[in-house]
Amino acid sequence: MQRKYYFKCTDCGAEFHDADFMYLCPFCAAKNQPGQPPRGVLKTLYDFEELKNRFQKDHSFFTSQQWLPLLPIEKAESLGHLAVGNTPLIPVNELNGKKLPFNLALKDDSRNPTFSFKDRASVLVSAYAKEHGIDTIIAASTGNAGSSLAGICASQKQKAIICVPAAAPKAKLTQILMYGAQIVPVAGTYDDAFDLSVALTEKTGIFNRNTAYNPFTIEGKKTVSFELFIQYGNKVPDKVFVPVGDGVIISGVYKGFEDLLELGLIDHMPVIVAVQAEGSNNIVNNLHAEKFVSQPSNTIADSISVDIPRNFRMARKFLKEYNGETVEVSDSKILDASKSLSSNTGVFAEPAAATAFAGLLKQINEGKISAAENVCVLLTGSGLKDVNAVQSVINIPDAVNPEKFLEDFNYKS
């Protein structure tokens, strides 16, 4: 059977039509240097002209087959029984009692099975492994990708090995262990955990899920853009705010919309807004730099705390080609946004996800959101992932004497 996809190097443009799977472009990967984002990250591409012809003959094929023609797997059943994706788009008409002059909606990916956007990547990598008889998958993670892979692998009867920084939030480590995965706490950063997982893959051949290494993670993450296209009535929003750490989620969002452009289903790219924490802004800082220079990350938003953004080169290329915007927000603004988001909408997002909402609030204050614009904020993880992070913006009251409280209580609706 003829393979329906091929790979193209983000950097040198080399195409690989004969490989069933590759991690990085071998020509560019040979030039990689320590302390620098990797070269040779691959795009997975399809015969868009053939797919365009199929769509013109049958307008339903795109949605009726769960986007299977645009995924590197053969059977939808390979995705398993967990309900990944198809997350709600929640309209928000007002904030703090004031009606918004634009149309805001939240894409709530905390509704995924392990409460994280990362399930989109994990389920596709797992499905490919299942179709190719692979029973063990390894990944590096600050928590979410690890708990995601662990949960998906548990559902698919596969083994997961997760390398994590020892300082990762306890809730995320607990998830990983509860799913039965093997956890490897690393004395160091996410980048150290990443390097260890790659070294283990090179030594043993264990299939690796790492983002900006395994090209199919982008293919899983791009499905959020397909869903937004459907949820917005077969068109795209004007702006999408995305939290950014290593650059993979934003690249997945771009890749999904780019596929739709290739198919002729949309005629323009929405404005994608890359939101980074001020304490971990290595993509924004280096967007126009001749040589990448890393600054040590220090942010409460652990899921986007990255010293060396592994997908920097692809993310930068997307942002420049499609005129994306960038926003930086402080940790205090991230925590304020998390509290505001929860109290206004009932959606409790972890700091990394709330970073995108903080970016929106900053652009509102700067007058950068036009009236009647359709604006989407991508929320990538549940606040229950890291409850310790938000303790400074809440106040748990002291215990009361029930009888005295009842006597003194004055209710006003």
Image (cartoon, grey):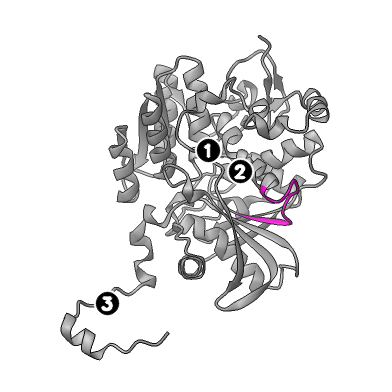
Rendered position, 257 above or below 372: above
Rendered position, 403 above or below 128: below
The residues bearing labels 1 and 3 have C-alpha atoms spaced at a distance of 39 Å
Q: Callout 1, which amino acid?
A: Arg
The location of residue 355, given as percent across then percent down, is: 53, 60
Q: Callout 2, which amino acid?
A: Val
Quadrant location of the C terminus in the rendered image:
bottom left
The mark found on residue 11 in the picture is none
Q: Quadrant of residue 7?
A: top right
> Which residue position is annotated with label 2?
224
The location of residue 124, given as percent across then percent down, is: 53, 30
Q: Is residue 312 left or right of residue 210?
A: right
- Evaluate if marks 1 and 3 touch, with contact meaning CB atoms under 8 Å apart: no
- Residue 235 in sight: yes
| Residue visible at 65% across and 71% down in the picture | 364
Q: Is residue 189 left or right of residue 238?
A: left
Q: Callout 3, which amino acid?
A: Pro
> Which residue position is annotated with label 1?
120
Q: In terms of sequence position, does the residue under pointer 2 or pointer 1 come before the other? A: 1
Q: Quadrant of residue 264?
A: top right
Packing grade of label 1 (10 A; few <14, some 14-19, many >=20) is many
- Evaluate if marks 2 and 1 touch, with contact meaning CB atoms under 8 Å apart: yes
The location of residue 259, given as percent across then percent down, is: 73, 35
Give the extent of the magenta segment: 231-241
